[in-house]
Amino acid sequence: MGKKITFFIILGWVLLLIGDRVDELRVYQGAQIAMYTIALASIVLLTGYSGQVSLGNGAMMAVGGYAAALTLNNLGSPVWFAFVMAVVVSALFGAFLGAAAARLSGPYLAGTTLALAVGLPEIANQFAFLGGVPGILFDVGLPPARFGEEFTQYKWFFWIATFIALIALFITSNILQSRYGRTWRAIRSNSLAAELSGVHSGRMKILAFTISSALAGLAGAVLAMTISLVAPGAYTLALSFALVTGAVLAGVSSLPGVVFGALILVAIPEVADVLANRWGGGENLNNYLPGLIVSVLLILSVIFTPNGPGENLRKHHHKKM
Amino acid sequence: MQKLLETFLIGLSTGSIYALMSLALVLVWRSTRVVNFAQAGQAMLSTYIGFEIASRSEVFWLGLLFAIAAGALLGAGVDFFFMRVLFKHAVSGPAAVVAPVIATLGLLGLIRSIVGLTWGGEFKSIKSPASTDGFTIGETTIPFSALNLLIIVTVFVILIALAIIFQRTNLGLSLRASAYAPEIAQLAGIRTARTRTIGWAIAGGVGGVAGMLVTSFNFLSPYSLDLLLVFGFIAAVIGGLESMVGSVVGALILGIALTFILNYVGTSLVFIGGFVVLIVVLLVKPDGIMARGKVRRG
């Protein structure tokens, strides 16, 4: 435990040092990577450990984002409390949804969450207090003055996002190594055997979905912070799809892998941009090339390395021995 | 009273389109144990092909025929080139359970991107095959139009054709047998893999019809069929995912219920209404309305 805390503190310190040495765009992307890391950890916990699929993590992120923004704007609370409320509200929402769908095996949770991801933008458009299409502001404020004039807004976002991501990863990794992590894996491998050993599999699945939703909500609040806004357009179905892709690329059951997955998710739009320009640009190419890359990556990885690239390396290694 | 009746009729017309989508999902689920989320994508691509034919020839029905053919080819292709490869590869490890669902999701994204790259994101529309003005009874005009009637009739013709195929032909018998007990069907000499591909083709064709019918009164865009997929899924869950009759009944119930919400409560609650129906069914009757006793849940 002590070693782990030391590791996370050193990791955080190194990240902050890196943040001082790169330009604004990279700092902003660093904040995005931190956000994706939290969101992917939520999928790894749910899919990789408890064996359930959520296709609507983007929707859960939206719940967290709106909860944070409404808390900050209406209660005038401190910023940290907005993030706490994002976690609490999305966990409650997840518990409710999980109670309906997570107990059932098979496609029910996938379909229900997909329905949510498709419908959530519509719901947000319909209610005035959610701000409609333009959304509502989420402003965490300027960086504290004691950091000096040089300290930019994006660097402040990066610091907050990294700090939150490190805490979230620390807690998640501890949960996954605990009794709960083991029980989830047992249910995933053989739910009948797990139940015969006295595991209440329905309850454990709901718990997994609840924690996963809480993480997703936290990621949603971080995303809202980096764009200073909560709007339906930020939490699209495409975001949910991208998250699933990132998780599969990371190897669905590997928590350290989420950093790799997050890096790829941030890199895809850049790569798509370069390719689109090289192939002559055009509106269609710019709009649909990122989605094409995400889908192709998802399909290839799910067919050839469904358990993540790490597994194939390990297999290869074993064969040699 | 009159509003009650017209709401019911329009709900029937909406529900019959949902019925086609939910039937397509159930057909694939029964044979492959995968909820094919790419169904929306397949239907969308077929509808774009139907749209091209219909707008060039100015004959809606020719477009519909091409959409059915394209949907069937696409469905068979997805099973043959995609699902078979997938099941060969993804067999073990943490991702084994979830790989097929995730793969259909990837396919949905792939088809959407291809459609977007080809046709762009702007809204397209087809000239309706029938009048969208309401019928006039005596002096009052009701919102129920010739197009609504045509949609109901088209769907019923297709449902009857499917019922005949499934109940009266050898193909239907092998489709039912391979869905019910694949191993025994195989031992009895049915080529289950080929039968499964045919099932996917039928589902694809049915999905193509659903897409064309939606587009007969609505815009077509790379995202326009997502809600149809969601409502089709909800209808299939109401029917228990296993039963073809159940999925049609579920879709009609859902269509009528949502139209009542639309006419009596307000537009803003239609999607939430559908979602509430889904949650209530999952909580109260997760095996669906057609369940007799205990059935497997996947």
Image (tube, helix red, strand yellow):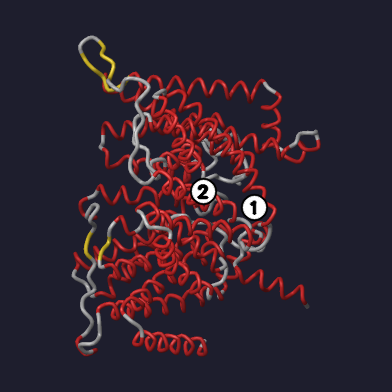
Residue at 58 percent of width and 36 percent of height:
B73
Residue at 37 percent of width and 57 percent of height:
A281
> What is the secondary structure assignment of the residue under circle 2?
helix
Residue at 36 percent of width and 23 percent of height:
B148
Task: Write down the quadrant of residue A157 in the picture.
Answer: bottom left
Q: Are marks 1 and 2 in contact (CB under 8 Å)?
A: no
Q: Can residue B119 be seen in this snapshot?
A: yes
Q: Can residue B294 be seen in this snapshot?
A: no
Q: Tell which subunit mark 1 falls on.
A: B
In the picture, measured across the screen, residue A260 lies left or right of residue B261, that is: right
| Viewer-proximal residue among A145 and A192 | A145
Label 2 sits on residue: A108
Residue A53 picture location, percent across and down? 52, 56
Residue A270 picture location, percent across and down? 40, 67
Which dot marks residue B202? none
- For residue A290, above or below residue B130: below
Residue A55 picture location, percent across and down? 47, 55
Residue B294 picture location, percent across and down? 62, 40
Do the residues at pointers 1 and 2 share their chain?
no
What kind of residue is marked 1?
Leu
Residue at 40 percent of width and 28 percent of height:
B56
Total number of numbered labels? 2
In the picture, measured across the screen, residue A155 lies left or right of residue B276, that is: left
Label 1 sits on residue: B86
